[in-house]
């Protein structure tokens, strides 16, 4: 009886603190959004998708510059994320200038690891190694989309619930 009550309480605690992934942007080195997808986005932007992509890229460009120029400490890795009271924007840039941006809830952890895995295990495997995909252009591969979704949904921070 005690074990059942303890297990039930533990499961409720785990469910309460499950994290949510809202969306993902991928920008090429020239600043064009080459891929975008959503999982649990609660609020739509009050603008066109094209405007949203331009604003997101501009924000990332500005934040990177701000961190490099005004940080009071040496930031070897540069800008990694920012946190608001409602969400967390997570950022990963590859050596070739690809930018992966994932919005999550504020309690999400290890998002950088997930973004690195998306790059290595999905982007490299199903875009770079795919002769039908044009480098730096919009990603329209269904295999890429399927593998990305499978990887993201398998990660501990993914939650099927919408708060």
Image (cartoon, rainbow, N blue to C red):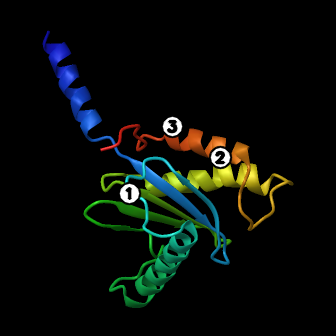
SS for callout 1: loop
Circles 3 and 1 in contact, beta carbons < 8 Å: no
Q: Label 2: which residue?
A: 145
Residue with the most extreme right position = 131
Q: Nearer the viewer, mark 3 or mark 2?
A: 2
Label 3 – label 2 distance at C-alpha: 14 Å
Residue with the most extreme left position = 2
Position of 65 with respect to 143 (left or right) is left
Circles 2 and 1 in contact, beta carbons < 8 Å: no
Image spot of residue 15 (x, y percent): 28, 34
When asked about the image quadrant of residue 94, the answer is bottom right
Image spot of residue 48 (x, y percent): 53, 69
Residue at 45%, 85% in the rendered image: 68
SS for callout 2: helix
Image spot of residue 140 (x, y percent): 72, 53
Label 3 – label 1 distance at C-alpha: 24 Å
Give the crowd class for mark 1: few <14, some 14-19, many >=20 residues within 10 Å: few
Position of 36 with respect to 74 (left or right) is right
Give the crowd class for mark 3: few <14, some 14-19, many >=20 residues within 10 Å: few
Label 2 – label 1 distance at C-alpha: 22 Å
Q: Is residue 75 above or below residue 140?
A: below
Residue at 46%, 78% in the rendered image: 59
Closer-to-camera residue (11/72): 11
**Which disc, if any, is residue 43?**
1
Quarter placement of the N terminus: top left
Quarter placement of the C terminus: top left
SS for callout 3: helix
Position of 8 with respect to 113 (left or right) is left
Which numbered disc flags the more N-terminal residue, 3 or 2?
2
């Amino acid at each position: 009886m005690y074990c059942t009550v303890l297990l039930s309480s533990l499961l409720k605690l785990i469910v309460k603190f499950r994290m949510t992934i809202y969306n993902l942007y991928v920008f090429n080195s020239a600043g064009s959004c080459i891929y975008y997808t959503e999982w649990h986005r609660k609020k739509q932007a009050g603008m066109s998708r094209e405007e949203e992509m331009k604003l997101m890229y501009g924000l990332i460009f500005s934040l990177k510059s701000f961190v490099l120029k005004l940080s009071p400490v040496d930031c070897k890795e540069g800008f990694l994320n920012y946190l608001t009271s409602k969400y967390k924007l997570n950022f990963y840039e590859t050596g070739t200038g690809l930018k992966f941006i994932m919005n999550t809830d504020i309690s999400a952890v290890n998002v950088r690891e997930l973004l690195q895995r998306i790059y290595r295990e999905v982007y490299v495997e199903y875009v770079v190694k795919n002769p039908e995909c044009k480098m730096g252009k919009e990603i329209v591969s269904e295999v890429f989309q399927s593998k990305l979704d499978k990887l993201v949904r398998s990660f501990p921070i993914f939650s099927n619930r919408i708060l």
